[in-house]
Amino acid sequence: MTVSFHKFGDYFPGTGHVHDIGYGKGKYYSLNVPLDDGIDDESYMLLFKPIVGKVMEIFKPGAVVLQCGADSLSGDRLGCFNLSIRGHAECVKYMRSFNVPLLLLGGGGYTIRNVARCWCYETGVALGIELDDKIPQHEYYEYFGPDYTLHVAPSNMENKNSRQLLDEIRSELLDNLSKLQHAPSVPFQERPPETELPEADEDQEDADERWDRDSYMEVDEDRKPLPSRVKREFVEPDHSDSLDMKERIEHTRDMDTALGAGSASVKTPNMGSQRLEACVKMEQENPNQPSDQAMETNP
């Protein structure tokens, strides 16, 4: 949607008639407000507020770009309007009242000291600050003489925009806006930040309910014992012990032979009766674990 308030007539580039309303899908999305020489604050507001207010109601823009051209001020070298700085800034104040994101731009303006005055004052309006009319001392102070004030009084130039002409322009543009489909009534809201909240730490929820490391060793008496099996391993006696025993036997035999005890006999110890050491390994049978994965425990 584009809304343009401008000088129209024998003026370059000669476009911007009230009947220039757009084409195709853009029809009625171009609003041209043609003005004649000498328009003042009161006449300008008779068009600006009703037309822009209707645009905000029907189109409901998500943002507004407002070009604050200063060539419409009174006393401009090329412009032919008669607006005061306060009247010019009233447009900015009115747009701020809709609480929609607003981008302010500069524009035309060919009397430099008045352009500086205008944009300084409108910066204060944008920030909600009312500036003092007296200009403080600064590097370019002499440019604003002889009054050294922020505001300049409009001239007494003739206003060629009759009340009837203004009413006709306003009526036609409002009628064009009524042919547009209303935008959905959704109020502007701030977008929530796209941040992910950290996951809650279960260990930090309640420190009193934390498990004690010794709790893993607690035995549940009601729990049924799992079946288990015993694996026995027999360890053969050490070969050194067997050799030592054989040597003792042969030594005894040698002694008997030397003594001539033919009837003597030696009784050898029964190896089968020797007690063997056993190592017992307990393997707990876990139904969820293969039988070959054993846990070795020491008795």
Image: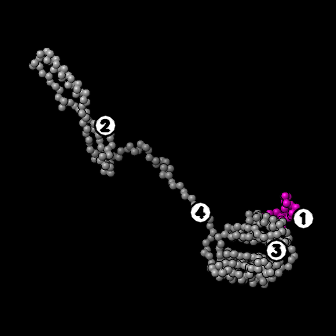
Residue type highlighted by circle 2: Pro
Q: Nearer the observer, disc 2 or disc 3?
A: 3
Q: Which residues are magenta?
A: 130-151
Q: Earlier in the sequence, mark 2 or mark 1?
A: 1
In the displayed image of the protein, which residue is found farthest to the front? 13
Q: Nearer the observer, disc 3 or disc 4?
A: 3
Q: Which mark is residue 299?
A: 2
Image point (25%, 27%), residue name: 240
Q: Which mark is residue 146?
A: 1
C-alpha gap between disc 2 and disc 4: 65 Å
In contact (CB < 8 Å): disc 2 and disc 3: no
Residue labelled with disc 4: 192
In contact (CB < 8 Å): disc 4 and disc 1: no
Residue 296 in view: yes
Few, some or many C-alpha atoms within 10 Å of disc 3 (few <14, some 14-19, many ≥20)?
A: some
Q: Earlier in the sequence, mark 1 or mark 3?
A: 3
Kindly indicate the quadrant of the structure image that contains residue 115.
bottom right
Residue 73 in magenta?
no
Q: Earlier in the sequence, mark 4 or mark 1?
A: 1
> x%, y% of residue 139?
84, 58
Q: Which mark is residue 79?
A: 3
